[in-house]
Amino acid sequence: MSRSAPVVPARTSFLLALGALALTACGGGVDGTPGGSGVRDPYFPKAGNGGYDVTHYDLTLAYDPGSARLTGRATLTARATQDLSAFDLDLQGLDVDEVTVDGQDARWNRTGQELTVRPRDELDEDGTFRVTVRYSGTPQTITDPDGSEEGWLRTADGALALGEPTGSMAWYPGNHHPSDKAAYDLAVTVPQGLTAVSNGELTGETTRGGRTTYSWHTAEPMASHAATLAVGRYAITRYDLNRAAPASAPAATSPTSSTASTPRLSVYIAVDPKEAAASRTVLARIPEIMRWAEDTFGPYPFSSAGAIVDRAGDAGYALETQNRPVFPGAPDTATLVHELAHQWYGDSVTPKTWQDMWLNEGFATYAEWLWEEDHGGDSAQRTFDALYDHGEDTHEDLWSFPPAEPESAAHISGSPVYQRGAMVLHQIRRTMGDTAFRALLRGWAAAHRHGTADTGDFTAYVERQAPGADFSGIWEEWLYGEGKPARD
């Protein structure tokens, strides 16, 4: 539909032109365009935002479990990937009090999870800017499409923040999609007597006026869904662990032993006192599992490790939060192996989209198979055979959809993603042989260390590592194929 242009008197035209110039001069601009509200993820299209890349989050928070009130100041340092007249942040619930860009007040508005920010001056492509959001309120619990809960989960004495896939937007504004990773600094103040545990390394703890502030630093890039914050009363265990030794150096023999030739890794474990006794034996295996994992997957990609054990409502699942995975109760050894393996596959090598979830869960599940095989349990082949024979009995029929193409957002954590994803890896192992496959595990983790990757990146990488092998049947039948593949 078209419209005829109205006739505008000359004086009015002159005044309109002056207004346009004034608008440009005060930052209205005409060169920039708004960044996208969402990165069009296949399963969560509103997650993340276009037009910029975050490099650092600086979060200053205060939480009172009694009132369930959170106050926060989030400063994001980012690089514009286009000329920007406006950009979006993901923030679910909570009240926004003030937004500034590079120290200047900015206009903003809210629509659903989108916080749209209009800086006073246009942001130039490749330029660095800082946006600060002051906010407060009662953080929300978010229900996923599969019915599980994430976001901000209240506990008996505090709270636990879990972010996969979209829950981090419940407690701080950001670019909440795995394709945008950043470093983090977090300072959280809680009533004295409570502890606040997050990712990375504890860099400070100060108490004043009946409140304690804990400061955490995560130097390595982290996807926002892997960020966590646990507030409550915990039994804390801390020690340094020797990392994988060079070939010429002796291996470490205990959590506290040391050699001059090997770097050390800080381990921080926080456990709900009610779960301490039940957790003690399995968590004591962290040094053993870490040494096995470094031997199997390559050097540990981070500067700290550990675990958080806390009961949070009906969450009922473990999660690979970076550096220290979260468990809803005392974990068993297989679950601990699974979540620690995710530090390589999922946290360091992060999926580009949620369609690539099998690259997280297939690898972590196969790590369980390898651990069993290397420690006197069933071989990976025997585990594979048992699943092939009884895959219909898994909690979601193993053959209901291919691991690389979940049916919907409600299925990205289904059995095909985990178990059939691991079966894909076993078929690759059978095709290329044990020695080449072990090299593949290490090489894939190294090639995309602290980065992102998708399924196409992985299949291309596999084919480069074994150029004489034919993987087409694996891709067509096991990775993308519908129904139960024929037994070969």
Image: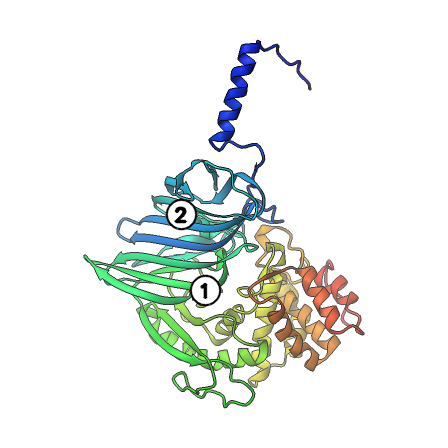
| Relative depth, front residue between 70 and 384 | 70
Position above or below: 282 against 55: below
Residue 480: image quadrant is bottom right
Q: Is residue 58 left or right of residue 221?
A: left
Q: Which residue is drawn at 77% across and 68% down?
A: 471
Q: What residue type is labelled 2?
A: Gln
What residue is pinned by disc 2? 140
Comparing labels 1 and 2, the label whose residue is closer to the camera = 1
127 to the left or right of 388: left
In the rendered view of the protein, which quadrant contains the C terminus?
bottom right
Instruction: Give the SS element for disc 2.
Output: loop
Q: Which of 171 and 401 is in front in this view?
A: 171
Give me the disc on residue 219: 1
Q: Is residue 383 visible?
A: yes
The image quadrant where one finds the N terminus is top right
Mark 1 packing: few (<14 Cα in 10 Å), some, or many (20+)? some
Image location of residue 261, percent across then percent down: 47, 86
| Farthest-out residue, left | 209
Q: Nearer the viewer, residue 240 or 331?
A: 240
State the residue at coordinates (68%, 68%). 424
Occupied quadrant, residue 193: bottom left
**Is residue 444 toward the left or the right of residue 158 in the image?**
right
Q: With respect to residue 366, does 16 lie above or below?
A: above
Residue 253, image x, y percentages: 44, 88
> In this rendering, does residue 285 appear at all?
no
Q: Is mark 1 on a helix, strand or loop?
A: strand
Which x, y percent locates residue 233?
29, 64
Q: Which of 389 and 315 is in front in this view?
A: 315
| Amino acid identity at mark 1 | Ala
